[in-house]
Image: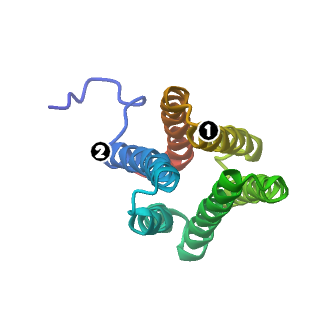
Amino acid sequence: MADSEVETDNCITYGQMNLINTLRKFWMELPMWRRAYLVSYASNFGDLDVIGSRLYDAPTDLGNVLEPFFGDPAARTIENMIREQIVIGAQILRAEKTGDIQTINQNTEALYRNADRLAAYLAQVNPNWDEQTWKNLLYDYYKTTILEMVLVLSGKYTESVTLYESMEDQALNIADYMAKGMIPYFTG
């Protein structure tokens, strides 16, 4: 039971907590589905299409969360930029498996251009988000994503699991930064 005598300035509401949990769930699921895709691709499990479809659709979940805060056009733009990151990542993965250095380099550059565009756009739609902070978060995440691909494809499974655990922390940092910038939109 809430005590009206207790200072509540540093407390969050149930709505704010739900937002934080929803963002954390999305940002944790994104690397989870991406890793499932990576492992399926590397091991030829036969479920690549099913996992790929779920991974490709994942950004819609984030777009649906962002829409009430920033409107449908902004939410869909962010959703599509994250989906573009997934597509580029799949292209890097295929190139890594075949050793196509030129394609790896081209798509890695495209991935970081995506990060730059996404960071700029996020800072544009929400004054509570800083473009450079977003770049730093996304660059670290993308760098780790590519390294995980290399480790799995080269059979360094122990290292890839350890790296994935650090990606979980990165995903939570991204989610928390996103939530921190959205909390001021709550009123009353």
Report the side of 24 relative to 169 (left or right).
left
Q: Check disc 2 and report its element: helix, strand or loop.
A: helix
Q: CA distance from mark 2 to mark 1?
A: 45 Å
Task: Tell us which disc is closer to us: 2 or 1.
Answer: 1
In this view, the residue in front, 8 or 171, is: 171
Name the mark on residue 14: 2
How many numbered marks does the figure carry? 2
Q: Check disc 1 and report its element: helix, strand or loop.
A: loop
Residue reaching furthest to the top: 6
Name the mark on residue 154: 1
Question: In the image, what residue occupies the spot 66% across and 61% down?
Answer: 125
Name the mark on residue 60: none
Question: In the image, what residue occupies the spot 66% across and 47% down?
Answer: 129
Residue 72: image location, x then y, percent: 53, 75
Residue 174: image location, x then y, percent: 56, 41
Give, as a three-letter code, the residue at label 1: Ser
Q: Which mark sits nearer the N-terminus, 2 or 1?
A: 2
Give the answer, above or below, for where 82 lies relative to 152.
Answer: below
Query: Which corner quadrant holds the N terminus?
Result: top left
Give, as a three-letter code, the residue at label 2: Tyr
Residue 160: image location, x then y, percent: 54, 33
Crowding around mark 2 (Cα neighbors within 10 Å: few <14, some 14 to 19, many 20+) is few
Report the side of 147 relative to 58 (left or right).
right
